[in-house]
Image: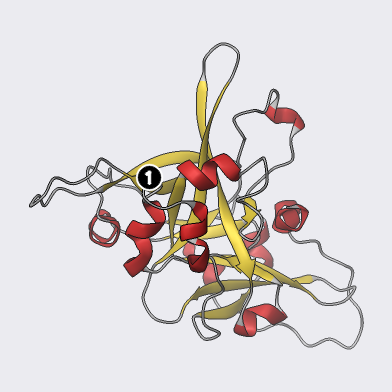
Amino acid sequence: MCGRFALEMTVEDMTALFDVVDVEPFPARYNIPPTEPIMMVIRGHPRPPGSNQPANRVVLVRWGFVPGWAKDPGRMPLLINARSETAAEKSTFKAAMRHRRTLVPASGFYEWRREGSGKAQAYWVRPREGRFVAFAGLMETWSDANGSEIDTGAILTTSAAGELAAIHERAPVVIQPRDFSRWLDCRGNEPRDVADLMRPVTPDFFEAIPVSDKVNKAANRGPEIQARVEPPVTKTQPKQQEAPEEACQMRLL
């Protein structure tokens, strides 16, 4: 996965899908960039026997993971993604994999395919069936020397499947609703117990829609950036146009 995603969901949708409580109304967000607050669903208190109380809760975290041992976050790379294959062993993510696994509500994400030496073509990637998806996430609370705290997070990635593989080799890990509880239960399930959930989706799970380069600018926040725009057919090599810098961060992890 690269550096942008979207969330178009009502409070009622969030409550029903993720079994959460006390969610404040929030606007649709069509172009969420790194370093901005994102929603993460975390495990709440255990539900008493026979109770209908929601089991989970929603927190806002900075999209850009900072490990607890970091002395100066400003000197660290922007960690928006974590490779699922190695997260349980990496010193940066291993504590969060064991103790702070999360779900990231989304409507879909954006990806870029580089056309040789030409410009990068943007795609809006969304589930073919259903309006929402849950990415696997990790959360960490970083504290400075003065005791100030900031909640931070990253999205786990895996190998891309189906038509996505022709666009980019990586994609977000998707957790299915039937597996929400197992993924979030960090007390009852160690990383090895949920390793089977961090696999690519079926090849037909997502559809990729070509869109304009408006999504490249985080200032463009309207739904029009998701409109289909067929890529132009050119015989000459255009001047190279870079995707957003954060779009390639996951390759470093």
Q: Is residue 63 visible?
A: no
Q: Position of residue 165 (x, y in %)?
A: 68, 79
- Along the line of sight, which residue is nearer the eye, 110 or 79? 79
The one nearer the camera, 92 or 80, is 92
Kindly identify the residue that appears in the image at 41 percent across and 47 percent down: 186
Work out whether residue 230 or residue 68 is closer to the camera in this orientation and state it. 68
- Seen in the picture, residue 183 relative to 240 is either above or below; the reply is above
Q: Amino acid at mark 1?
A: Arg
Q: Position of residue 37 (x, y in %)?
A: 49, 41
- In percent of width and height, residue 49 lies at 11, 49
Q: Quadrant of residue 13?
A: bottom left
Q: Quadrant of residue 168?
A: bottom right
Q: In the drawing, does residue 21 fall left or right of residue 162? A: left
Pointer 1: residues within 10 angstroms few (<14), some, or many (20+)? few
Q: Nearer the viewer, residue 28 or 85?
A: 85
Task: Residue under label 1, please give it.
Answer: 187
Give percent across and percent down for residue 107: 44, 65
